[in-house]
Amino acid sequence: MMKLGSAIRLGFCALALAALAFALPAIAADKVDPVADAKAFKKFFYDKFPKLKPEDFVNGPYSMDEGLHKQWVEKEQFPPYEFAVEAGKEMFTKPFKNGKTYEDCFPNKGIGIRQNYPYFDEKEGKVITLELALNRCREANGEAPYSYVKDEMASLTAYMAYTSRGKPMDIKIPDDPRALAAYEQGKEYFYSRRGQLNFSCATCHVQSPGERVRTEVLAPALGIVNAMPIYRSEWSGMGTTSRRFVTCNSQVRGVPFNPQDDEYRNVEYYLSYVANGLPISGPGARP
Amino acid sequence: MSITERQFSRRVILQGAGAVALVGLGSVSLGLPALAAANDKYPEEAFKQKSDADAIKALYGKAAEASDKIKLDAPEIAENGAVVPVSVTTTLPDVTSISFLVAENPIVLVASYRLPAGTVPAVANRIKMAKTSKVTVLVEAGGKLFRTDKEVKVTVGGCGG
Amino acid sequence: MASTIRVRATNNGDITEVQALIQHPMDSGFVKDSKGELIPAHFIQQLTFEHDGKPVFLADWGGGISKDPYVKFAFKGGKKGDELKVSWVDNKGATDSTTAKIG
């Protein structure tokens, strides 16, 4: 029969362990507070890496490892993704069959607006990402949509990201319960374990940034979408946000969702929002 | 440029060893790129060799001695074997050629650069490495051949699949 | 069609520094595709830079140079406004060339 004191201590330990295992900024379970989330998210990473400036986080593993940083700086002098940006620019201004261009679908002709995506469309009640908006533009003008994981979409988003380089991420969550729900779902996705390896996004990108998973140095979750789309050495080419989400799921031996499914759009919404204020660094290069 | 002038230039080039200003053929459109004379030939044989000794022999026909006057800049651990930034600078005088070898590549010779007089003896390029390997840079200077080596580690990315 | 060659040439008094990035697959011939078949070798073999009608840098490349190849070098001479001619030929006999202004 356990003494009361021991029972209380045991109970307290169990609670503490549960809190640690969660590794989350503490929020009240019934109130979604993105402002507090973003603040806590940033504080977690700033505290973890006191030598880094906020804008360093958008460079992923290159801010985590000196050797990688040096190789990256050398390649950034004349980066291989220049061709994708040029291709994207050419595509952006080339007329559709009906004579219109992508410029007609976007504010400011699509220049310098990438940092506003994803946004919550109150008419439709869902999160709209840049990739989704681009394909909608195509369909609205009688063109077939592009694959979300191939070169064309990568080039288009690379160009748009390039025109926004340096601008601070600026995601809005309107005062609409559906927007808050989408944000919260994205956050839940981020912290949920999946796949045979039973990793959540947080397992690698919150618990272990700067450390290695096998031989790869992990990027911090803060600012992780600011560099999208990314030219990966591994892909020898430019790849979209959709492609990265799909491959990340496969890598933890989980069944990926379809590109632009709710889960992916919502997690992009969450990750973009908590990185508000950090600069767009896309299109980025990655190992 | 008349035919006789061209032949004269060829003779001058073939006589000289080391750095000689190569004269271009101008923009004669024969569907061929504008190249200078005979010793512009692509070193086909050297690009077939599978050992660094054979590649050096095929390319330069002489042995290379180690030199501390060559600075080879390559990462300790390559981010990815597909794109490894490697550069070299040297204080050796009268440099006419710089080449890069990767001992563990299926074809050891990766690149060979010819530097006419007036070109700074330094090159930066991005190379492929099949796996962890010794990287060798060869510098032909004043008719002699020098080398320096560095081991570069290449890992297969963990999340690379 | 736009050239595959991108050049940045800058003159700092004595020396002109040149960087080039070229769009080319640089297939070594050793890599297999998703069906397990070898992707045939397809790479730039020779790359030439000319200033004032004279070659200032010549590259002999193999399949061991990275895709979308990059090279940087410098030469004495050249001044702002001068032209730099860059041309390549690959193992299939294809060629491309461009002329860039030194800035």
Image (cartoon, coloured by chain):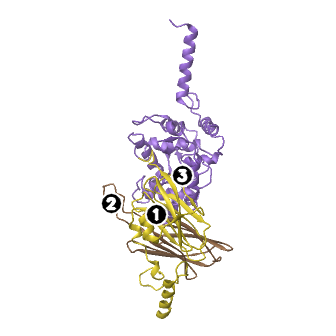
Residue A260 on image: x %, y %: 44, 47
Write down the residue under mark 3: B76
Write down the residue under mark 2: C38
**Colour purple maps to chain:** A
Label placed on residue A75: none
Residue C2 on image: x %, y %: 48, 72
Image: A216 above or below B22: above
Chain C as rendered: colour = brown
Q: What amino acid is found at the position of numbered circle 2 in the picture?
A: Leu
| Circles 1 and 2 in contact, beta carbons < 8 Å | no
**Colour yellow maps to chain:** B
**Residue A156 vs residue B88, the one in the foreground:** B88
Viewer-side label of 2, 3: 3
Image: A280 above or below C84: above
**Residue B52 vs residue A232, the one in the foreground:** B52
The subunit letter for the residue under badge 2 reads C
Write down the residue under mark 1: C65
Q: Secondary structure at mark 2?
A: loop
Q: Residue at x 42, y 43 (%)?
A: A251
Q: What amino acid is found at the position of numbered circle 3 in the picture?
A: Glu
Same chain for marks 1 and 3?
A: no
Image: B39 above or below A9: below
Q: Secondary structure at mark 3?
A: loop
Q: Secondary structure at mark 1?
A: loop
Q: What amino acid is found at the position of numbered circle 1 in the picture?
A: Ile
* Pointer 1 or 2: first along the chain: 2
Other residues around mark 2 within 10 Å, as few (<14) / some (14–19) / many (≥20): few
